[in-house]
Amino acid sequence: MERKKHSNTHKGAAILFFLFSLLFFVLLARFIQLQVTGVADGQVLAAKAEEKYKQKRTIEAKRGTIFDRNGEVLAQDVPSYTVIAVLDPKMTTDPDHPRHVVDPQKTAKKLAPLLKMDVDEVKRILTKDAKQVEFGANGRNISYELKEKIEALNLPGIGFIRDTKRFYPNGNFASYVIGYVQKNNKKNETVGKMGIEKSLDKHLREKDGYVSFAGDISGFRLPNTKETVVPPDNGANVYLTIDQKIQTFLEDAMNDVEKQYKPKKIIAIVADPKTGKILAMGTRPSFDPNKRNIQNYFNDAISYPYEPGSTMKIFTLAAAINEGVYNGNEQYRSGYYKVGPNIIRDHNKVGWGTITFNEGVQRSSNVAFSILVKERLGEDRFLQYLHRFRFDKKTGIDLPGEAVGQIHYKYPIERITTGFGQGTSVTPIQQIQAATAIANGGKMMKPYVVDRIVDPDTGKVIARNKPEVVEQPITKETAKQVLDILETVVTSEKGTGRPYQIEGYRVAGKTGTAQIPSPRGGYLTGYENYIFSFLGMAPKEDPRLIMYVAVQQPKLSYTETGAAPVSHIFTSVMKNSLQYLHIQPSSNKKASKEKSKGIEIGSYAGRSTEEVVKELKERGLVPIVIGNGRQIEEHVPLSGDKVIAGERVVLKTDGEAVMPDVRGWSLRDVMKVAELLELRPSTKGNGYVVSQNIRPGALVKKGDYLIVELEEPRKWNERMEQEQKEASEKKSDGPVD
């Protein structure tokens, strides 16, 4: 019995030995396999180990900033925060320092006003069955300032997730030029969707960097290990040609017109005709890129071709002059002109009898321009000029979505109507480009909005735009003659451009009233169903700014014309921009030399103040002395200028500069003071000065703002009479000596 038991024990031990030996050899084989292949269950063990112990931290990069031409920020990345609430009680390990929301009612009451939400809505979010919650749109992208206010409440469980957002500090300012970005949450990428943000996305886009290292389970770096650093690649900075100040003038003027006249569209562009730089560009309706409340996804200034109306006559006139077939004193019969079975009529239907071609330009006579195309230039030659002015091509402006108009030249009537802006369509930017040839001595400049692209880390210029002459459709002499005639459109009593006069500056330009095609065929009818426009340049003798304004279907009163909303934008923006750029009024050097008679100004710099004052008075002029110095440093008008008797001559002495009393002065005289003292003038109204922001006799320094309010001569006289009357009454009521 005992021997049998012993035998069974040996058998069991042998079986166990065999099983453990088999297991050992299986484990040994597996170990050898892992050592040789380094793969388990299809996964590389070294990679899994590295994944477990290697720590990686993202180094955030920054999207490029967009600046105006003076370095003012138009779009930039800024820190933003998302408010979160921790609701899980397990997150609190110390009851004295809770890390979750303990009292939802109290928290909601304090938090709701800062997030601009209802208390009940916040409480509902704070009582959800969740570990962590957010507060929707009201809790996202909050500013650092708001974050600090929330932190100051010391609310348990309320925290923040840091992020960045694209911020546009000026709202709907040049929004169709700048564009906007949108975040792709799946790829965590910010992508430009419109304007410069889209067209230069490859330059503006950033790429995050990272630092990686071997770490323990808690995320701490292990000693004596190397780290890998891939630096972030920040997006390039973009400097535009847009001038924030001029763009602000434009935005304010468009806002006024939009509010008062409620038009369907407004389009406006301000450019430098010498370079092609776009200084301001705006449309209505517009949008705020921070909110992306977009109604129209096209930039109408470059993407909206339409029949331009009479602004097209500028280029027909230029073609006729350049070909030597224009005689402004030649007469023709206005009213109507027959082209085959069709009759072209002037805008007043009956014309003005027999008038000269110059008067026809001033009155915007369709018949005059029909004759120029049909009988003077010839249709084929005129078509060549349309190509020279590039109305058949895109300008190539560095903005996405540019369209091109269509030259309709198939039928005889289309060839004629194109000469005065009907039938053929063009874009506003095409008109601006073509008009640079008129304002720039015949050289047509390519428009552009990007000045340069700069590496933010090194300051190196990656790319730069330079002025480019794309064509010379007319001669310098032709351009001057066109400007001379276009000035009379604004100054002549018969001119359609009289509302576009700017005191102190000579303006050359042309009005336009374009018909709008009807969906049912033909054109819309009605007093307001037009696109009213003006294309103007100033100062006429050497244009520094060119501006196009179009207002579509404004709500006009029966006493108003389409020029009312258009001129409000043009005159205010052009005048403020010229003054802001310190462009001198037309009345001084160049304008005065065109006069054959006048009193010539001598050279007074360095001479005795007393002596110069006496001499000017003897010559019938009015000396205005600025400062208490004994010697003249500068003066306006300049030496060699010719002036009329009674004109003010402003003399700056070597003493401290003080502000004269300019009440009762014209704008032209005020600008003399602003020029000498290097002040920054701003004006309101027209006529004579009735108030000034700098007190007479006050010390002034370079760069001070001089704000003056002007009133019409009639109102000025009434004001003076009233003041004299009040002074007389006050004197009579006083004590008798």
Image (cartoon, rainbow, N blue to C red):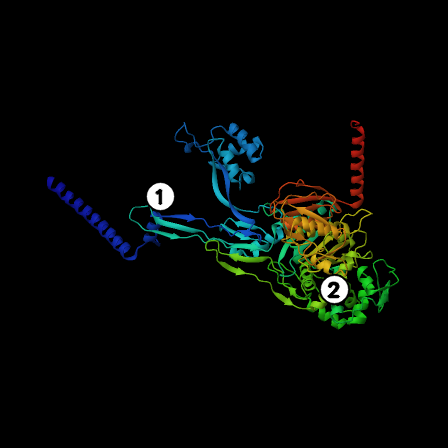
Viewport quadrant of the N terminus: top left
List x then y, in percent, for residue 620.
Answer: 76, 51
Mark linked to residue 482: 2
List x then y, in percent, for residue 229.
Answer: 38, 52
Using the rendered image of the protein, determine whether residue 572 is visible from the camera's viewpoint. no
Rendered view: 90 above or below 53? above
Alpha carbon separation for disc pair 1 and 2:
76 Å
Mark linked to residue 288: none
The residue lying toward the viewer, choosing from 477 and 617, is 617
List x then y, in percent, for residue 380.
Answer: 75, 72
Q: Is residue 524 shown left or right of residue 136?
A: right
Marks 1 and 2, the one that precedes in the sequence: 1
Q: Determine the secondary structure under disc 1.
A: loop
Q: Is residue 681 shown left or right of residue 528?
A: left
List x then y, in percent, for residue 524.
Answer: 79, 55
Q: Is residue 364 shown left or right of residue 395?
A: right
Q: Determine the secondary structure under disc 2.
A: helix
Rendered view: 628 above or below 479? above
